[in-house]
Image (cartoon, rainbow, N blue to C red):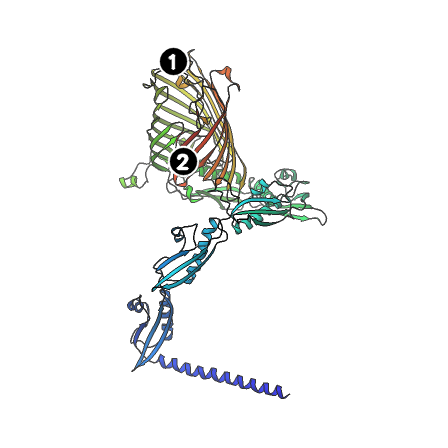
Amino acid sequence: MKLRKVLLQATSLFVVLVITLYFGYGRVHGAEIQGKASRIIKKIEIRGNQRISTAAIRNSIRAKEGDLYDPHVISQDVDTIWSLGFFDNIGVEFEDMPDGLKLIFVVTERVVIDEIQFQGNKKIKAKHLNKQIVIKQGDYLKPYLLKLDEDKIKEFYIKKCFNRIQVHAESKVADGKTVVIFNIDEGPKIRIAEIEFKGNTNFKRRKLLKQMETRQKHFPTFIFPGRFDKNKFESDIEKVKEFYMNNGWLDVEAGWEITYSDDNRKMYITIHVKEGERYYVESLQINGANLFTEEELKEKLKLKEGGPFFLDAVEKDTYQIRLAYGEQGYIAAIVKEKHTFRAEGTKVDISFAIEEKDRHYIEKIKITGNDKTRDNVIRRQLTFYPGEKLDTEKIRDSQRRLTNTGYFDMESGMPAGINFEQGSEHGKQNILIEVKEGRTGMLRFGGGYGANIGAFGDISYTDRNFDITDLPKSWEDFLQGNAFRGAGEILTLRFSPGFERTEILVSLTNPSVFDSPYSAGVSFFNYLRWYREYQQQDLGSRIAVGREIQRDFVVRLSPEFDIIDIERRDDKEDTPQDVLDVEGSHLKAGVTLSANITRTDNIYMPSKGYDGESSVEFAGLDVDITKYKIKTTKYNTLFEVPKWGKHVLAYGGTFGIVESTSGKEVPIFERFFAGGYGSIRGFEYRGISPVDSKTGDQIGGNILMIMNAEYLVPIYKDIIRMAVFVDSGKADESASDINFDNFRLSTGVGLRLNVPFLGRSTISIDYGIPVVKEDEDETQAFSFNFGGGGSF
């Protein structure tokens, strides 16, 4: 009891003491502030500054000599001085003066870095590390920036495969100089030597590796260095699990262990997979569908009764049902999916509940953003019209067609967008088309090299949105690019001199005359080509009239008149008789009927779809021939690796046949040759054909048969791709040789480089190995093509 009483007394005294001190201080401090507040600032001093001038600090503060002391103003001045970024500490002091006080700002300047050193960096030079850090010599020393630069150096080393890098930054004063030192312990350079999977009974190692960004070291090491990034690797493990789940193994588990070689330079990763059991769809029901039968909708789904339960297919199938309704105008249809797991076993019950809503029709089509392109030029690319039901498939197709015109800004990411807005009444929608005008005219001064045409220069101007009737209102109007724009006509002016080929071309095409499905064009050309056996010059003009039969399917009729001049090569001792027979000038008048279809996802870099062209030519005067040619290519995306790119298989073929209608032989300049880029790689351009019996020179054949297959593997997105190809075919004498006899075969690898600043040009490098060849064939292992003619 006595102890308790003593504690209570002590506590009471302590509380009284605290209250007395608090209120006593408050009165004294308040009196002090109150005393200063009623006094005038007689003088302001700045102390502690050495590099920063007093005038610079004075100019930044609001307080002035002669002002009444205001604590709020002084507080703001402290903040202002601090925001200059030159000081580590700022204090305020007062001194009494007659009839006032002296206000003193005491500053402590930040240290200036005189020198930056790196210690312990043996594998990476200091000049490379200097480029990574933020702080520079002459900057003020800021501790948080030192920490930031430590992390930047670590990141740089990790990219170079130094996973155990340690960096510690410190500052020292030596000989009156402030030196920042980055102490580096590089550790060994560690590369991933192998990635192994254990427990993966249903998927092969190769299939699982495609789900990951982490790669083990292999050639070429500048692309596959075997770098280990912990965050990326952990994300890869989740991707592997997601892959299993999307294929029905919902209970999958994945872990890993990492071991190192004795010298700590090789990393071995083992990923342990516990797959579990696969889940299957026990029942699948679709409720609320009136527009479609349940069977019609089920055909569109990836999930099937009795089939595996693909987790990612749940969302995709929901989208497919909405897509089916969208194509019929039910754009507001609601589709809800529900899946439940049975208590026993690995069975899943799936149901889709559909609320169809109302069908929508197109009321108006509104176009915005087309400052230069005419409305009608845009409307003729659309596959939908006012008054018809709204079809989302036609919307997507129209958006693709607008993008592929090349009229609009491809670099914007969305050159042509299509959206909806409510119309004037229920059930009607307005279509909003928003485009971003791009640069359709391209003036090019450059050149290139083609495996088939050698080195060449190129001075050309191409405009895909030309308007010959849009005359300039002034010279300034012409220079600013506001004239001759907006009608969707295609103008090409080209002068392309070269060592093996020279071309002059003037061409103008209207792809939709009076907004009709008809096209018209005219071109004038002068084409000079030096072959091994002779020199050929084509001077002529062509008129082309076409009609779009279906979307992306065009038929053209092209009358043409040529003057063809053939001269033997002076440096050629033995000229083939077939060249001597046609030496001199020849008049040729002909007409060509052609058909072209292009249904690919991208006209410049297709990954799915197909394209094809065929033509039949009838010619007379001095050149009496009939020539038929067809070429097709199919593109398939085999699979796509996220953030990596698409694996594309392209395959196709070419067939051609030419016959004389006068009973004479087909002139050598109208015959077919095989070999070279765009034909059969591994052979020279025109290196495959029948040969002259005396000179051994290729003299061409009357038939052409070529088959190509190419597998494109992304190395770095769509910018760098590797190609593996197989080419086969022949050029032979006559129609009786339409068989697989004398077929040549080649295979090889190549690179495709799509450099953004080079526009749509692709650098192609191929190495072909002839597997089946004839003795008289001309072979060529490497082919290089940039900006030249010829393509797969």
Task: Characterize the local packing of mark 2: few (<14), some (14-19) or many (20 or more) Cα atoms within 10 angstroms.
Answer: some
- Amino acid type shown at disc 2: Ser
In the current view of this chain or complex, which residue is farthest to the right?
344
Quadrant of res 409: top left
Q: Is residue 153 above or below residue 573?
A: below
Q: Left or right of 457: which side holds 310?
A: right
Q: Residue at x 38, y 13 (%)?
A: 577
Q: Position of residue 292 (x, y in %)?
A: 62, 39
Residue where numbered disc 1 is placed: 577
Q: Is residue 784 above or below residue 135?
A: above
State the count of labels: 2
Of the numbered discs 2 and 1, the one sitting upstream in the chain is 1
Helix, strand or loop at label 1? It is helix
Q: Nearer the viewer, mark 2 or mark 1?
A: 1
- Amino acid type shown at disc 1: Gln
Q: In the rendered image, is residue 387 in sight?
A: no
Q: Alpha-carbon distance for marks 2 and 1?
A: 40 Å
Residue where numbered disc 2 is placed: 761
User: Which residue occupies the foreground of this view, 398 or 460?
Assistant: 460
In the current view of this chain or complex, which residue is farthest to the top?
663
User: Which residue occupies the foreground of this view, 271 or 103?
Assistant: 271
Helix, strand or loop at label 2? It is loop
Task: Characterize the local packing of mark 1: few (<14), some (14-19) or many (20 or more) Cα atoms within 10 angstroms.
Answer: some
Q: Position of residue 315 (x, y in %)?
A: 59, 45
Q: Is residue 559 above or below residue 257?
A: above
Q: Position of residue 513 (x, y in %)?
A: 40, 31
